[in-house]
Amino acid sequence: MSETPPLHTLDPLNRFSDRATDYQKYRPSYPAAAIDKILSNLGDPTQLIAADIGAGTGISARLLSDRGLQVWAIEPNAAMSAESELYPRVEFRQATAEQTELPNQSVDLVTCFQSFHWFEPDTTLREFRRILKLTGRLALIWNSRDRDDPLTQEYGELLQQASSKHPALDRMETLSESSYFPAFEEHHFALEQALDLPALIGNTKSRSYVPSSGELLDRLLQDLEALYQRNADDLCLIYIKYQTKVFIAGA
């Protein structure tokens, strides 16, 4: 049996280029309680600088800005950052997690929302240690589909079939020991995303492991419509449930 390749070897810098519009419009946000936990005891948010790494289209950068932080949104993919909107206190910079080009000890908070699994972990954590202030914090965040919810589990099974069980679909969201950040706290928060049929399709097509054309995509779209028709409520919505997992380490 061949070993699953690390995700950072599967062209992470370019694989979302044709998904950016759907990503911006249809990906879920993150619970307010998760942002509260990330910022707890860091001090006055208006005095904090955050580096949001793998910022994508700016979903998480905007959440941090809304709390008053100055945010450097680090994103290597020009198509993704082009989908971002001008937003107060958010500055996009084209760089990678492994080489952010930020000064030493320049940020109070490093965040990775739905992105850390695409990075080479050892090099990245060393870089995060370099750019964090001595009093700073690292937070790694994932929205994970809640497999205890029958509808969400069925949706995940459709993604598995269409993606031929791509390794990104069931990525590990646990962290191996690192000399740079030896201990992480783990916190979970419930999240629910309400979707009409176009949003369900758009959310699905935003995922880099879903085929962008061909028979597998055609079959997936048929299955998604059937899933939607069986489960839509009186508001013409279905609800995908997540557990937002937050891993926090001090500098």
Image (tube, grey):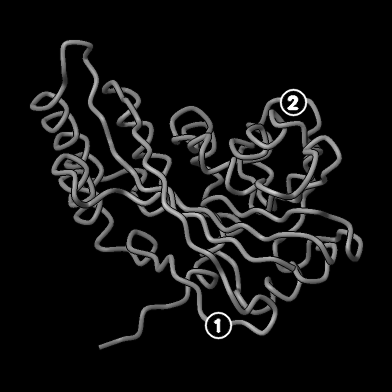
Residue 95 vs residue 154, the one in the foreground: 154
Q: Which residue is mark 2?
A: 87
* Picture layout, residue 201 above or below residue 154: above
Q: Gap between marks 1 and 2, in whole Å?
A: 36 Å
* Residue in the image at 51% along x and 80% along y: 176
Q: Residue furthest right?
A: 103
- Image coordinates of residue 89 in percent, x first then y, are 81, 31
Q: What kind of residue is marked 1? A: Glu
Q: What kind of residue is marked 2? A: Tyr
Q: Quadrant of residue 65?
A: top right
Horizontal arrangement in the rendering, residue 56 relative to residue 4 (left or right):
right
Horizontal arrangement in the rendering, residue 206 relative to residue 56 (left or right):
left
In the rendered structure, find residue 177 and report the number of the disc placed on it: 1
**Which secondary structure lies at badge 1?**
loop
In the rendered structure, find residue 250 and report the number of the disc placed on it: none
* Picture layout, residue 3 above or below residue 87: below
Instruction: Name the quarter where the C terminus is drawn.
Output: bottom right
- Image coordinates of residue 171 in percent, x first then y, are 39, 65
Horizontal arrangement in the rendering, residue 39 relative to residue 134 (left or right):
left
